Amino acid sequence: MTKTLWISILSAATLMSQPALAAADEPGWAYYGGDEGGQRYSDARQITPANVAALQPAWTFSTGDLASKGEAIRHAAFENTPILAGGRVYVCSPFNEVSALDPGSGRAYWRFDPRIDTHLRYPNEFNCRGVAYWRNPAAPLHSPCAERVFMNTNDRRLFAIDAATGKLCAGFSRGGVTDAMPGARLERPGGAQITSPPVVADGTVIVGSSIDDNQRVRETSGAVHAFDAVTGALRWTFDPLAGAGPKVVAGAANVWAPMSVDPALGLVYLPTTSPSPDFYGVFRPGNDGHADSIVALHARTGALAWAFQVVHHDLWDYDLPAQPTLATVTYRGRAVPALLQTTKQGLLFTLDRRTGAPIIPVVERPAPQGGMPGETLSPTQPIPVAPPPLAPNRIRPQDAFGLTPWDRAACRRLIAGARNDGLYTPPSTQGTIVYPFTGGGSNWGGLAFDAGHDIAYVNTSSAIHKVTLIPTAKLAAARAADPGAEISPNTGAPYGMKRELLRSPLGLPCNPPPWGMLHAVDMHDGHVLWEVPLGTTSDLAPGSQLLLRDTGTPNFGGPIVTAGGVVLIGAAMDNYLRAFDARTGRELWRGRLPAGAQATPMTYVWRGRQYVLIASGGHAKSGTKRGDSLVAYALPR
């Protein structure tokens, strides 16, 4: 047989092993946030308000975790958003098992398991929000690892996987894997993890981290690391606290949320977190460098382009939890390349992504004072003039909620007994109201943006945390008196801390509902178009809807919006995927799921049919039903 014939046969076999691609103009979802800027928008328009009620399951895929992970599944959160790239859907389980699937049937092409230790316990449970896909422009088509899937793991490794075969890319670092947090020093093996996907920009893979809260003053560094996408060599490192000043003793300020990329500007945008420990800042005087900031870096070199801080000297765990959204915003008639950043306080910042200057003005407003001895509180905090806060941030004892007079009176006493001067009240030994709580208003799900109409869709949660500083000598007694409470040592500080949700004796939040909302914001002027409750208590307490109507629930995960005029979201603490009319906010449909959907959906068109995918696996910290399914919905053929 001639050499030419052998080459022809091998080439044909290679092509046959590749999945058949859909039409090039069919809308896909190649990045965690839909596009590199995290708009969570799709041009797909097959599903509309008129027909969305006909959606039905088209296929399901099981990661196998329910059968294989035993006790560890109780400590997992299936927060994954799959991506569609190169003709395959890629999904990762909470335990970092990656599967490549047929987009039309859910059939698995391959599966890669990094075999993480399931006996460890991590600060944010076992979690994998997504993976990143990269096509090497210098590699020949169909050559090994020309297409790569990058995944960082709970145990802090970065893998480069051949997107076509599921095999490791041998030329990347040490056989396809590298240490994603080189030089990190941990007090315990599970003290840091990586939960959000990396991003790839200009041939550089950029990785953040998630670090233990409130364990010690001298915490692990939250430095961001960048690696060569071909070789795995470390290119640069950026520490948000590097310029905080010589008197600052702290760690963390990490980037646990997803990042965004503007390829035209060559910038990567980091949403940074609070320094350690969250609620006691005497050992970090000043405004904490670039902690609690949107930081724009040159992707190739890691050099700082600009930074904008959204919380000064954070004492409330009000870190930036969501991917920055890059879009063109036409505010008051002027179109500007923008960055939209949601926050746990329910605020929405709108900045020029070229410079960091506010597009919608930001005002420094006086903040409550009178912190712990030695604390250097900021006299002001930045507040955007529009939109108004999307989550309530003030509560009086007389506002307490309860189903009965007894229930309400108990909540009234809890609120009245804490220090409560409004947003940014400093922590205290008396106990301080933190409202919205540290899991709200908007969390890691971020927002969806419809560029055609300049509308942002944001989901928020509303609940109250009470944070109490406890003298170190009294920590053991506090733990003994309340063994189920979250009590952390803040080792190296004179105070530990206790964080608790304020709930009535019946277990309901002490703040009035709605406890979860979906909002639409017109970015032409920042006014709220509509807002509706999100979620029901039906799966938390069956039968409770007879008494609790239109309450919504706290929610984790975000929305997507389509050109068909539909907003799709799971997130709530019931087992549903919902569709809303993007114009009016009316709920149009809900699809029953096998488990909780604390994840952000995605959508794509494959061979003429639009699919909507949602991870349905539940969430350990939310207490929702556990599972291991990826569910695809579509209209009937």
Image (spheres, rainbow, N blue to C red):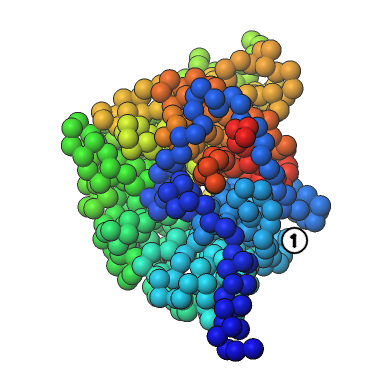
Q: Furthest-bottom residue in view?
A: 2
Depicted 627 relative to depicted 15: above or below: above
The quarter of the rendered structure image containing the C terminus is top right
Tell me what residue is drawn at x 42 percent, y 34 percent. Answer: 563
User: Is residue 60 or residue 394 the one in the foreground?
Assistant: 60
Q: How many marks?
A: 1
Q: Quadrant of the N terminus?
A: bottom right
Residue position marked by numbered label 1 in the rendering: 119
The quarter holding residue 597 reads top right
For the question of whether residue 216 can be seen, the reply is no
Q: Quadrant of residue 490?
A: bottom right
Instruction: Say above or below: 297 vs 179.
Output: above
Q: Nearer the viewer, residue 235 or 345?
A: 235
Q: Position of residue 623 (x, y in %)?
A: 69, 38
Query: Which residue corresponds to the image point at 69% horizontal and 23% vertical from the top-left?
Result: 538
Image position of 261 with respect to 409: above or below: below
Residue 338 horizontal/vertical position (percent): 28, 45
Q: In the structure shown, which secondary structural element does the residue marked by tag 1 occupy? A: loop
Choose top left, top right, bottom left or bottom right for residue 345. top left
- Amino acid on which disc 1 is placed: His
> Callout 1 environment at 10 Å: few (<14), some (14 to 19), or many (20+)?
few
Task: Answer yes or no: is residue 38 visible.
Answer: yes
Q: Name the one closer to the observer, 495 or 13.
A: 13
Horizontal relation, residue 367 to residue 545: left or right: left
Residue drawn at point x = 61 percent, y = 83 percent: 6
Residue appearing at x 45%, y 76% in the figure: 139
**Closest to the observer, 58 or 124:** 58
Left or right: where 216 falls relative to 537: left
